[in-house]
Image (tube, rainbow, N blue to C red):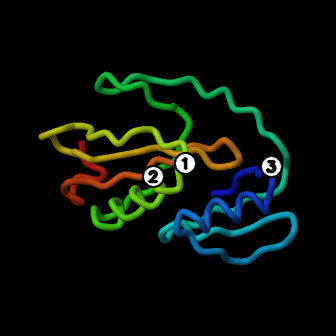
Amino acid sequence: MSLPSMSIRETKTFYTSIGASLGRTTQSWIDVNLFGHQITFIKAGKFNFNNPNYVFEGKILPSFHFGIILDLKTWETIHAKLKSQNLNLVTESTFLKDKVGEHTSFFIKDPNDYLLEFKSFKNSKDMFNS
């Protein structure tokens, strides 16, 4: 995935602070290894997303976001770390309770205004099942 970035420096700082590692880097772009998923950020300034929300199980969620799927132990570690940094987290929620696809999630916004959803499935086999 490749996304526009307002600041390569701020993007590096944010992603390394949440546990991602850095790949190739220049002054105008950076590769980020986000728990085994590559995201390339390219310095392009503010990008205007019209991101309406939707309601799922009574919660208002952002339509435009991308998800990072983690095992529960890693999810708990990341969640605790980010909470301790006083970052703006959308509160932890469990979705599809006692159903196929049950997972616990929280959202956080990066310095480019992208929303990341960190989630952990109760049963990893249900990740893409409905």
Q: Is residue 16 above or below residue 120?
A: below
- The local secondary structure at tag 3 comes to loop
Q: Position of residue 61 (x, y in %)?
A: 45, 30
Q: Nearer the viewer, residue 90 or 25?
A: 90
The reply to whether callout 1 and callout 2 are in contact (CB within 8 Å) is yes
Element at label 1: loop
- On the image, the x and y values in percent for residue 119 come to 36, 52
- Mark 3 or mark 1: which comes first in sequence? 3
Q: Is residue 118 above or below residue 97?
A: below
Q: Amino acid at mark 3?
A: Met
* Mark 1 and mark 2: Cα distance apart in space: 6 Å
Can you identify the residue that label 2 sits on?
Answer: 83
Q: CA distance from mark 3 to mark 2?
A: 24 Å
Disc on res. 6: 3
Q: Provide the secondary structure element on which disc 2 rests.
A: helix
Asked which quadrant contains residue 76, the reply is bottom left
Q: CA distance from mark 3 to mark 1?
A: 19 Å
Contact between labelled residues 1 and 3, with CB atoms less than 8 Å apart: no
- Look at the numbered discs 3 and 2 and tell me whether their residues touch, using CB distance below 8 Å: no
* Crowd tier of the residue under label 1, counting other residues whose Cα lies within 10 Å: few below 14, some 14–19, many 20 or above: few
Look at the image and tell me in which quarter the C terminus lies.
top left
* Residue that numbered label 1 is attached to: 87
For this view, does 6 lie left or right of residue 52? right
